[in-house]
Amino acid sequence: MFSLRNVQHAYDGKPVLTVPEWQARQGEQWLMLGPSGSGKTTLLHVLAGILRPTSGQVTVADQDMMALSSSATDRFRGKNIGIVLQRLHLIDSLTVMRNLLLAQYMAGEAQDAARVRDVLASLDMADKADARPHELSHGQAQRVAVARAVVNKPKLLLADEPTSNLDDARCVQVLDLLLAQAKACGATLVIATHDQRIKSRVANHYELKGAA
């Protein structure tokens, strides 16, 4: 599903990421582990095509990400990759429904309100379709962010520290949510985390030690 080989990235000449090799198959579930500062968010952005690494090979869904232009990368991401960032970046002036329809539009997909309603229903958020983000609790807003990430049926679902600063009960709920939605889409799931509580729930682990 994706393959990383000899991936390195540096900021202002300072190495911040080194990945000799990592491969994952379609539908697998992975934790990307490592302490703060080890490069987890940087690597997640590389996988999402948000960041082009300094060097190396990055292939996602048989596509060489390094060969795409910036606009082509945006289109590819919209169609194939869903991402839940630490900051949810919901548009507060739009309803929940319109936030998700916008995700379809930005990916070049037909705006499908029925699909949006189905996704919201699967997350127990059907009654919030007409609400605006500021009217939601943090947990509800996080569910909307997950809905936005999966509404286009991505092949790759990425989540950046989704359980940080959550109590144990909420941590379990968020992890269950991500696992269930990835399974529903048949997506490969990668969760970047330093949360030791969830290590036993996901079989595949890739650990970052920091840049060499």
Image: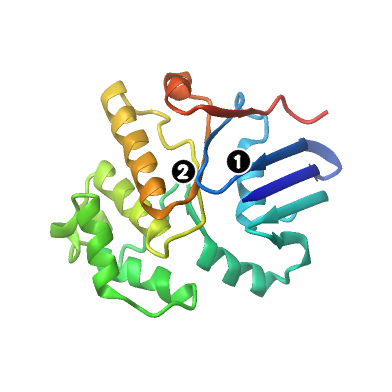
The residue at which mark 2 appears reads as 86
Tell me the element at label 2.
loop
Q: Where is residue 100 in the image (x, y as percent from the top left)?
A: 34, 66
Q: Are marks 2 and 1 in contact (CB under 8 Å)?
A: yes
Q: Position of residue 81 (x, y in %)?
A: 53, 58
77 with respect to 164 (left or right): right
10 Å neighbourhood of mark 2: few (<14), some, or many (≥20)? some
Q: Which amino acid does label 2 sit on?
A: Gln
Residue placed most toward the observer, 174 or 90? 174
- Relative to 5, say whether 202 is above or below: above
Q: What amino acid does circle 1 point to? A: Thr
Residue 59 visible from this viewpoint? yes
Q: Can residue 53 be seen in this view?
A: no
Instruction: Tell me, for residue 41, which label it has, or none.
Output: 1
Residue at the (44%, 47%) spot, across then down: 87
Taking the image as shown, residue 98 lies to the left or right of residue 82, namely left
Q: Earlier in the sequence, mark 2 or mark 1?
A: 1
Q: Where, quadrant-wise, is the C terminus in this rendering?
A: top right
Image quadrant where residue 5 sits: top right
Q: What residue appears at the point 73 percent right and 45 percent down from the top-left corner?
A: 4
